[in-house]
Image (cartoon, helix red, strand yellow):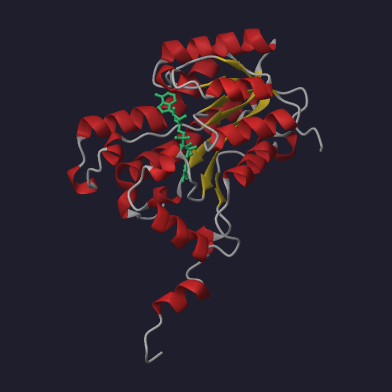
Amino acid sequence: MPNLLKGKRGIISGALDANSIAWKVAQRCHQEGAQIVLTNAPIAMRMGEIKKLAEETGAEIVPADATSVEDLTNLFSKSMEIMGGKIDFMLHSIGMSVNIRKNIPYTESNYDYFMKGIDVSAMSLHKMLATAMKLDAMSEGGSVVALSYIAAQRTYPFYTDMADIKAMLESITRSFGYHYGKFRKVRVNSVSQSPTKTTAGTGIKGFDDFYNFADKLSPLGNASADSCADYCVTLFSDLTRMVTMQNLYHDGGYSTTGVSMELMEGMATNNS
Ligand SMILES: NC(=O)c1ccc[n+]([C@@H]2O[C@H](COP(=O)([O-])OP(=O)(O)OC[C@H]3O[C@@H](n4cnc5c(N)ncnc54)[C@H](O)[C@@H]3O)[C@@H](O)[C@H]2O)c1
């Protein structure tokens, strides 16, 4: 196995349990020789699962609510102290919509919940990047990846306010990508991932049906969390050092397929 991330230091947010995309990313980064710090909201820590991942990957855990600049300042300072230098890569794998959790239709969105969703799932990326920049915590040529979903570009009625929130997240990758690129040649990209069976994913109404639909539409099938981790490793590596401010589809070809023969067959009428 090549050591694509040998000597690199990374921060991985969002590993809740073994299904989390971030969990797989942490495992792959460790396999590729990186040293990592794991972080999640203090409430997620109390659930305890993350300690297993920390043991497996030799990582330390620094709790941080991604909406708190104070927590994020502590996260970057502690991470540099623990790993003995600046941060080379960072994964933003944070998403939560109270409107989705409470099954509230998009047209009846509760605005306090909407604001909470924006703060947790999109503004948190801005806060992470701004905090890192203020502390000058990222290495020259470092790489930041945030996870997104195609509902930022196309309408998926069940994705409700998260569609707008992901559009904002992707916009922040572009806007901040410019500034961090100029400042330290830091790359900022989003990866638009296939539906994936995780706690956040399966919390969406009708997820299983939609998962199967996307699987049948994509020529390669849905991209798994493991393959997403592989892709993130390439983006953290030096091999992609000129890729920035992009929304990169990791979806088995879903985003550019109009229709598949499997789905056409399912729609066939008697006179066709
Ligand atoms: N699962 C999918 O189908 C899918 C598809 C495309 C993109 N994504 C995105 O991938 C990312 C990771 O989600 P996942 O599917 O692995 O689910 P997950 O539930 O395993 O991960 C979401 C994480 O966000 C963390 N989080 C929530 N509030 C937080 C806060 N205030 N501070 C810090 N962390 C907080 C949770 O503790 C959890 O670890 C999300 O951005 C999600 O939108 C998921």
Left or right of 260? Residue 151 is left
Q: Residue furthest bottom?
A: 271
Instruction: Write the residue at 43% across / 17% down.
Output: 42
Q: Nearer the viewer, residue 214 or 121?
A: 214
If the picture is divided into quarters, which one holds ligand 1? Answer: top left
Q: Nearer the viewer, residue 185 or 30?
A: 30
Split into 4 quadrants, where in the image is the C terminus? bottom left
| Residue 51 visible in the picture | yes
Left or right of 172? Residue 181 is right
In the rendered picture of this protein, how many numbered marks are placed on residues?
Answer: 0
| Residue 148 coordinates in the image, percent (x, y) | 47, 42
| Residue 253 coordinates in the image, percent (x, y) | 57, 60
| Quarter occupied by residue 112 | top left
Instruction: Write the residue at 60% across / 61% down.
Output: 220
User: Height in image: 257 above or below 5?
Assistant: below
| Residue 41 coordinates in the image, percent (x, y) | 44, 20
| Residue 242 visible in the picture | no
User: Height in image: 259 above or below 176?
Assistant: below
| Quarter occupied by residue 236 | top right
| Residue 43 coordinates in the image, percent (x, y) | 40, 19
Q: Residue furthest right?
A: 2
Split into 4 quadrants, where in the image is the N terminus? top right
Instruction: Write the residue at 58% across / 48% down.
Output: 224
User: Height in image: 248 above or below 96?
Assistant: below
